[in-house]
Structure formats: structure tokens, C-alpha cells
Image (cartoon, helix red, strand yellow):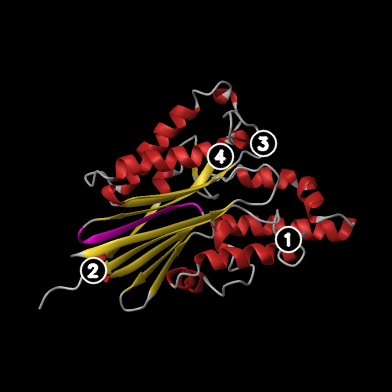
């Protein structure tokens, strides 16, 4: 199949003075792949990497290791994820102090990746990133694991109840309920919990892959949960609507609208969450068919 490939990425850093953006996106057309990683800082804010956060380092390093392996189509996307994850973990453990860290101190992340051949598009997901694949017939297919978001939502409602009962801010409630957030984090890569990318590498084998015939694919959209929150912040009505706006060239506009909505609810009272805004990133790859001579 002959097609012209185009892509777009955009990112916004979340709230907090001096924060590092812990999302990382890349498109590697020569390797026929795209990778998005949403890094997460350890809950106790331990930081071993000079000049950036550990989570920012983890997201960038994992994405680059993955892109280096995905070009080999004899390796499955899950194998590439496992190999890239192990290489990233080994590099992280070389930082002084890393081997002694507790699990809640280590960086982790969610991963969404695309790989395409002449005939097939593969979408591999681990964690709470979102993918929407739009086909040439106009249908849209959402790929999203809501396990972690359900756990988070329970804590956000606990925060609201605590803040209401004690007359505190939501930020103060978040600090008071930190043991609940630690409890959730300890469910990562454990049976009955949720699967994600981390230094233990236990979650990689639990990633899932969905495939589509490339001749039927118009575009593939990936985003981190920070950008997907446009749906919960009432900027877009659904993941499908969000992907459609990005496909229409409105990705940056959606990001601006999202940030305005978050600032209008900076105290997190209307839309319950743990902070005003998170890092928000999207990646879109478009496959445009080339017209053939009659």
C-alpha cells in the first residue's frame, strides 16, 4: 500500500513551579514506529537524576530504547517493550542510591506505541494512556484501560469528602490522605491491581496489542491521561471527539481550552483531582493514501 505519512505531537507541562514535563513522545518514521510514555514520579519525590526529574528521565529513556527495538519486525511489540524496559531499568540502577530505593520511590509510567508495516498497524498499550484509531470508513476504535483511573477516582472522592468535612483545601486533603495514594501505588504490577511500566519490569508482559489492516487506517491518535482529561474537564465529550478535534487540526486549541478549564477550577472543587493540571501530551500519525495513475 502506498501512503504519505504525516504526524504531529504537542505537549504542555502541568502545574507547579519548576516542574519538569514527565511526558515524552517521539515518532521514528525510518523505524515505522511512534512511542508515547507518561512518566510518574515516586510518591516520596526522591530524585537521583541531576538536572531533571527521575520520571522525566525514565519516560525519555524508555521511549528511546523502545524506538531502537521496534524497527526490527522479527521482534514483537511486547518483546520490544520488555527488552526496552529492562535496558532502562538497568541504566537507572546505575544511579547512586537507586538499588536501595523502595518501590514507591521509583519512577514508573504508562506506555502507548504504534508500529506499522506495509500491511498492518499495531497498537500496544500498558497503563492509562489512550489510543483512538480512525478507519477510512469513519469508524473510531478506542483502546483504554481504566483500571488505574478507577482507583484514582476513589481517592479523589475521598479527598473531596475530607476537605468538605475538615474545611481544608483539596491540596491539604491530598497531603492528609497520602497513605491512601501509597496504598494504590503498591498495587502497581501486582495481581488484582494494575499494570504499568516500572523498574521491576513486572508489568511489561501484561501489555496488550490490537492490530488493524493498514489499508483501513486513516489515523492513529495517542495521548497521556493529562491530555485525555479534556474529556473529564468538559472540553470534549468523549475520547472519540477528542481525537476528531486533533484530526481537524485543533489539538493545540484543545490544549489551550483544557488549561483554561483547569485554571477556572484551580481548587479542584468542581472536577475532583489531585492537582490543578497534569502534563498533557498527544501524538497523531496520519496515513494518507497516494492516488494511483489510471
Left or right side of 46 for 160: right
Q: Nearer the viewer, residue 38 or 161?
A: 38
Q: Which image quadrant is residue 102 in?
A: top right
Image position of 19 with respect to 251: above or below:
above
Q: CA distance from mark 2 to mark 4?
A: 37 Å
Quadrant occupied by the C terminus? bottom left
Visible in this render: residue 135?
A: yes
> Which residue is painted at 49% across and 29% down in the image?
92
Tell me which label, 1 or 4, sits earlier in the chain.
4
Tell me which label, 3 or 2, sits earlier in the chain.
3
Q: Report the residue marked by disc 1.
A: 157
Q: Report the residue marked by disc 3.
A: 45
Image position of 112 with respect to 41: above or below:
below
Q: CA distance from mark 2 to mark 1?
A: 44 Å
What numbered label is drawn on residue 215? 2
Could you tell me what secondary structure mostly forms the magenta stretch? strand
Tell me which label, 2 or 4, sits earlier in the chain.
4
Left or right side of 268 for 128: left
Left or right side of 127 for 214: left
Tell me which label, 3 or 4, sits earlier in the chain.
3
Tell me which label, 2 or 1, sits earlier in the chain.
1
Tell me which label, 1 or 3, sits earlier in the chain.
3
Label 1 close to label 4 by CB (< 8 Å): no
Amino acid at each position: 500500500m502506498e501512503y504519505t505519512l504525516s504526524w504531529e505531537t504537542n505537549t504542555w507541562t502541568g502545574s507547579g513551579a519548576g516542574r519538569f514535563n514527565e511526558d515524552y513522545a517521539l515518532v521514528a518514521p525510518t523505524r515505522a514506529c511512534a512511542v508515547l510514555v507518561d512518566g510518574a514520579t515516586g510518591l516520596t519525590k526522591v530524585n537521583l537524576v541531576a538536572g531533571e526529574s527521575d520520571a522525566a528521565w525514565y519516560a525519555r529513556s524508555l521511549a528511546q530504547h523502545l524506538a531502537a527495538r521496534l524497527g526490527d519486525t522479527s521482534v514483537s511489540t511486547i518483546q520490544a517493550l520488555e527488552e526496552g524496559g529492562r535496558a532502562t531499568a538497568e541504566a537507572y540502577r546505575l544511579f547512586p542510591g537507586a538499588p536501595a530505593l523502595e518501590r514507591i520511590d521509583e519512577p514508573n509510567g504508562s506506555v502507548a506505541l504504534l508500529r506499522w508495516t506495509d500491511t498492518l498497524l499495531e497498537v500496544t498499550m500498558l497503563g492509562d494512556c489512550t489510543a483512538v484509531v480512525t478507519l477510512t470508513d469513519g469508524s473510531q476504535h478506542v483502546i483504554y484501560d481504566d483500571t488505574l483511573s478507577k482507583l484514582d477516582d476513589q481517592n479523589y472522592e475521598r479527598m473531596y469528602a475530607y476537605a468538605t468535612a475538615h474545611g481544608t483545601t483539596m491540596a491539604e486533603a491530598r497531603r492528609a490522605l497520602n497513605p491512601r495514594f501509597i496504598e494504590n501505588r503498591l498495587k502497581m504490577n501486582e495481581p488484582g491491581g494494575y499494570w504499568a511500566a516500572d523498574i521491576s519490569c513486572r508489568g511489561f508482559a501484561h501489555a496488550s496489542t490490537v492490530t488493524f489492516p493498514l489499508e483501513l487506517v486513516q489515523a492513529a491518535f495517542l495521548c497521556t491521561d493529562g491530555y485525555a482529561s479534556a474529556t473529564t474537564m468538559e472540553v470534549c465529550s468523549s475520547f472519540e471527539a477528542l481525537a476528531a478535534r486533533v484530526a481537524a487540526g485543533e489539538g493545540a486549541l484543545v490544549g489551550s481550552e483544557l488549561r483554561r478549564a483547569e485554571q477556572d477550577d484551580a481548587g479542584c472543587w468542581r472536577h475532583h483531582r489531585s492537582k490543578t493540571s497534569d502534563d498533557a501530551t498527544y501524538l497523531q500519525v496520519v496515513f494518507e493514501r497516494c492516488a494511483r495513475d489510471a
